[in-house]
Image: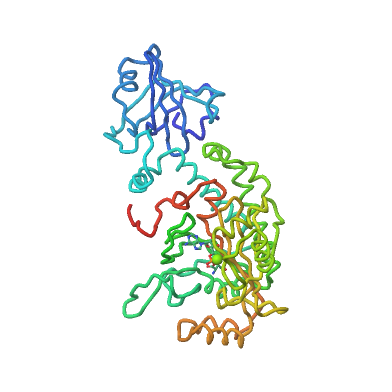
Amino acid sequence: MKTTINQVHKHVGEEVKIGGWLANKRSSGKIAFLQLRDGTGFIQGVVVKADVDESVFDLAKKQLTQESSLYVTGVVKEDERSPLGYEIQVTDLELIHEAIDYPITPKNHGTEFLMDHRHLWLRSKKQHAIMKIRNEIIRSTYEFYNNQGFVKVDPPILTGASAEGTTELFHTKYFDEDAYLSQSGQLYMEAAAMALGKVFSFGPTFRAEKSKTRRHLIEFWMIEPEMAFMDHEESLQLQEQYVSYVVQSVLENCKLELNTLERDTSKLEKIKAPFPRITYDEALAFLKEQGFDDVEWGDDFGAPHETAIAESYDKPVFITHYPTKLKAFYMQPDPDNPDVVLCADLIAPEGYGEIIGGSQRIDDLDLMAQRYEEHGLSGEAYEWYLELRKYGSVPHSGFGLGLERTVAWIAGIEHVRETIPFPRLLNRLYP
Ligand code: 4AD
Ligand code: MG
């Protein structure tokens, strides 16, 4: 019967046929061990000389090269030593296509070499595990927001206005007009929230950032919920529930993958709402106490600061109430102190940095008009956004979660370049 590796547990003792590739092999005398993969998983196939035709054994032992494609027929056996719990006692092999000189051999390769071969590197066991975890984060995101009554809305990628500042925009021509690749769908999601109540988007965003760090991509995917009638505090509660839900879903549904990546899951098990909250002022005082003298009130926190703060907690931590002048034009000032805004960054544990940025949005027309003035945002491109404050404006909040940083944290991967299938980095547009 034709099946896949992730289904073999249903066929113990039966003969099955699987289409796959040879990931690796070793042999000794009268036995060959094939490391097979089929997209759904990895399994060992055992070929015993005495049990198969001579041509089959020869194929397994000699001709079969790494990444050749083949049909494997064999009997499913339970096997405690394998991470999967099963192996295949091979009865027949059928070569589909012979791979010659596959460049990624089982020895170690440098990062640049692997990045140049990203189209092939994706086949490796580690990259496979990361992509499966990324998929589970996406799947559980949809599940969470659907359960909570959110509507998925797709904002445009080609835009006429910037949401997060003008220095990092990708410019392009839109026939005779100027256009930019979206940095964030937020402004459009605010319009959508006024039409549909609770909405979320999930799509690619682009930032022409000249940063070459382990947390920065030029093209990354963002999940952006926006909620009418929710204030800052209600938004924080939603954020901590959402992040907890995603982490617990990965723990439950990606055991094999977390094991492959040797992720310390005891750290993830602690990720349950509520999350700690500290204000920007408290964070600054803490940093001073820790001996950081390179940051003053009004400065943004850098990676070392975020890491130092995160290290005091075993859960993600919200840093709230940043100085108004540090943050985007649309954030609602704190009614008790207009020098700070009703916003929060969520900082992941273990040095993974900011995974969410969010805020309550200005809903007052006059104040928004004043902010336009201060930020030099005039013209047609922003007119529609102002109109949202003109017709039935309501308090509303929203946030954006960066998918790749979240994958890096949950999967325990050092650099975001391995968390997206084909990373776009400062010096990389290939493959
Ligand atoms: O904090 P940011 O810039 O927030 C916004 O864009 C808001 N408009 C979102 C909203 O309220 N709807 O970006 C949100 C998140 C960050 O916390 C980070 O996780 C991720 O997006 N991010 C990046 N991830 C990878 N590479 C980059 N260059 C990133 N820039 C931001
Ligand atoms: Mg941010």
- Occupied quadrant, residue 200: bottom right
Image quadrant in which the N terminus is located: top left
Query: In the depicted view, which residue is nearer to us: 1 or 408?
Result: 408
The residue positioned 60% from the left and 83% from the top of the image is: 389
The vertical placement of 145 against 72, above or below, is below
How many numbered dots are placed on residues in this image? 0
Q: Is residue 156 left or right of residue 406?
A: left
Q: Is residue 325 left or right of residue 93?
A: right
- Occupied quadrant, residue 169: bottom left
Measured from the top left, where is residue 53 in percent x and y?
34, 15
Measured from the top left, where is residue 384 in percent x and y?
51, 82
The residue positioned 51% from the left and 35% from the top of the image is: 6
The vertical placement of 70 against 61, above or below, is below
The vertical placement of 94 against 357, above or below, is above
Measured from the top left, where is residue 374 in percent x and y?
54, 85
The residue positioned 68% from the left and 67% from the top of the image is: 279
The vertical placement of 158 against 62, above or below, is below
Query: In the depicted view, which residue is nearer to us: 271 or 11?
Result: 271
Measured from the top left, where is residue 316 in percent x and y?
64, 55
Query: In the depicted view, which residue is nearer to us: 422 or 107?
Result: 107
Q: Is residue 260 left or right of residue 208?
A: right
Rendered image coloring scheme: rainbow
**Residue farthest toward the top in the current orientation of the protein:** 50
Q: Is residue 258 left or right of residue 239?
A: left
- Occupied quadrant, residue 104: top left
**Residue farthest toward the left in the current orientation of the protein:** 100
